[in-house]
Image (tube, rainbow, N blue to C red):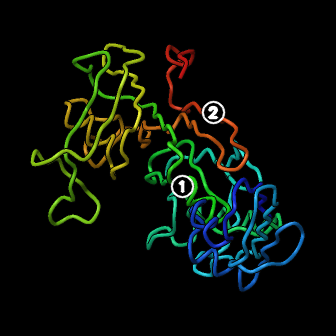
Amino acid sequence: MIFRYNIEETIRVKDYFKKIHLPSNVITDVKERGQILVNDQNVTNAYLMHEGDLLEVVFPPTHQGENIISIKGDFEIVYEDSYLLVINKESGIATIPTRKHYENSLANYVMSYYKRMGIEANIHFVSRLDAPTSGLIMLAKNSYILTLLKDAGIIKKYMLEVIGHMDKTNGIIECGIIKEEGSIIKRTITNEFINSKTIYEVKGENKKNSLVLATLCTGKTHQLRLHFSSSGCPIVGDELYGTKTKDGILHLHSCYLEFVHPITKEKIILKSSPNWLIPDWESIEI
């Protein structure tokens, strides 16, 4: 993989790397196994560049993680290029390997896909989804792209069905979220501080439940599940903070991603609808 930069000032290569936030481990890897070219000539990171120069950084092949077992599995690809992969994850699939899902996580399936397609990439989830949560999830194909995306201001929205009706048709939920004492998985609400924020809008209602579109302003573990449970309207199918349903599906779906591509600078908007929508709600736009 090669990244090209048009230089607009007098600056040393190593200082330019700092300017573009190239991680130190990536720089070391490029120096040892890749190439640094200025105007088609090999240079060191101490080379002094000038306005009009073309810097090319040749990244070495990625060492694919040996800790992630390659297992063939099906998944839906929503978007892919040389830098990114966006998948529409099914409910019930863990994002990364765990003791319970050591060989049947999305990471296992993606690693198999990379190897079968001859893609030199490792597993870098930009953000994760709980196993019961379905919808859009993004991966960077190398650590440099992951670093760029951390400050990309990604807009993430979720569609969820809650039990009952919210007090307001739109609003903001803010509170503190901490680990529940004595539990590895569960979180709980605290009033001592605020570290989580969700903006929501009610998009549909029936006699029992409501369809809500929620925008994450922060990304705390179980944030949406706790926010709506604490508001008196737990998400349908939430076994941790509500009640189990007959279909065994958590009605929480990552439905919208909006971001500026870290390389092409193109604005990208991706959408996905959950498969648990009732007919009256299928026409509602995200």
- Left or right of 226 on screen, residue 111: right
Q: Residues within 10 Å of mark 1 (few under 14, many from 20)?
A: some
Q: Amino acid at mark 1?
A: Val
Q: Residues within 10 Å of mark 2 (few under 14, many from 20)?
A: few
Whichever of labels 1 and 2 marks the residue nearer the N terminus, that label is 1
Q: Is residue 31 above or below residue 271?
A: below
Which of the 4 quarters of the picture holds residue 5? bottom right
At horizontal 69% and vertical 77% (from top left) the residue drawn is 45
Q: Amino acid at mark 2?
A: Ile
At horizontal 19% and vertical 47% (from top left) the residue drawn is 176
**SS of the residue at dot 2?**
strand
At horizontal 58% and vertical 39% (from top left) the residue drawn is 259
Q: Whole-percent x and y of residue 119?
A: 79, 65
- Left or right of 265 on screen, residue 277: left
**Cα separation between marks 1 and 2:** 16 Å
Q: Does the rendering let one see residue 67?
A: yes
Q: Nearer the viewer, residue 229 or 9?
A: 9
Q: Whole-percent x and y of residue 252?
A: 43, 38
Most extreme residue toward the left, as rendered? 192
User: Which quadrant would the N terminus be assigned to in this image?
Assistant: bottom right
Residue 239's label in the rendered image is none
Q: Nearer the viewer, residue 49 or 275?
A: 49
Q: Whole-percent x and y of residue 182?
A: 16, 66
Q: Is residue 86 above or below residue 110?
A: above
Which residue does the numbered mark 1 point to in the structure image?
A: 126
Q: Does the rendering let one see residue 1?
A: no
Most extreme residue toward the right, as rendered? 40
**SS of the residue at dot 1?**
loop
Which residue does the numbered mark 2 point to in the structure image?
A: 269
At horizontal 35% and vertical 21% (from top left) the residue drawn is 210
- The answer to whether marks 1 and 2 mark residues whose Cβ atoms lie closer than 8 Å is no
